[in-house]
Image (cartoon, rainbow, N blue to C red):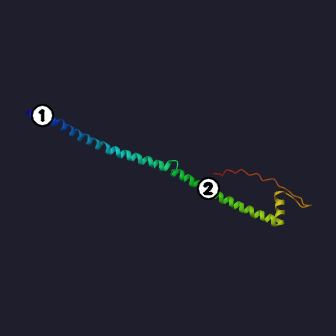
Amino acid sequence: MPEENGQVKTEAPAAKRESLRAWALGWTQRLWRPAGTLIAVVLALLITWHVIYGNHGLSVWLQKRAQDRSLQREIKNLQQENADMRQQIQRLQSNPDAIEREAREKLHYAKPGEVIYTLPDQPQQPKQAQPGK
């Protein structure tokens, strides 16, 4: 019998260790699976936030796109204005009547014997309140 007691004593700590390992492994698996899922969800949310609101995110891209459209419109307007000015320069260089018209309108020049009358600018009339409002 002492041998059986000796075997039981030597096997008992090994069985306890195995059951302790099995318990720890089960506990770890039950704990880490939800924790891993939570970590993955948090990382996905952080990446999504960075994609939308980061330095080069979607909101910045939309702002830059709107700014680009605005600048493109401004460029078109300036190009049209330049083309108009080039046409006016061409007219002034080639047409003496155009030069005379500019001198009369902008510089208020007159031919000898002409009298120029300038009228004062009309003041803007304030809008009257509409009845019933």
Image-based side of 5 in relation to 103, left or right: left
Q: Quadrant of residue 85?
A: bottom right
Disc 1 marks a residue whose amino acid type is: Gly
Residue at 44 percent across and 48 percent down: it is: 47
Q: Residues within 10 Å of mark 1 (few under 14, many from 20)?
A: few
Number of numbered discs visible in the structure rendering: 2
Q: Quadrant of residue 6?
A: top left
Say which of 121 and 97 sits in front. 97
Residue receiving disc 1: 6
Residue lying furthest left = 1
Say which of 127 and 79 sits in front. 79
Say which of 103 and 82 sits in front. 82
Residue at 39 percent across and 47 percent down: it is: 41
Q: Look at the picture and state if 83 lies above or below 126.
A: below
Residue lying furthest top = 2
Say which of 61 and 18 sits in front. 18
Image-based side of 96 in relation to 83, left or right: right
Of tags 1 and 2, the one toward the viewer is 1
Disc 2 marks a residue whose amino acid type is: Ser
Residue 34 x %, y %: 33, 45
Q: Residues within 10 Å of mark 2 (few under 14, many from 20)?
A: few
Quadrant of the rendering where the N terminus is positioned: top left
Residue receiving disc 2: 70
Q: Quadrant of residue 68?
A: bottom right
Callout 1: SS:
helix
Residue 75 x %, y %: 65, 58
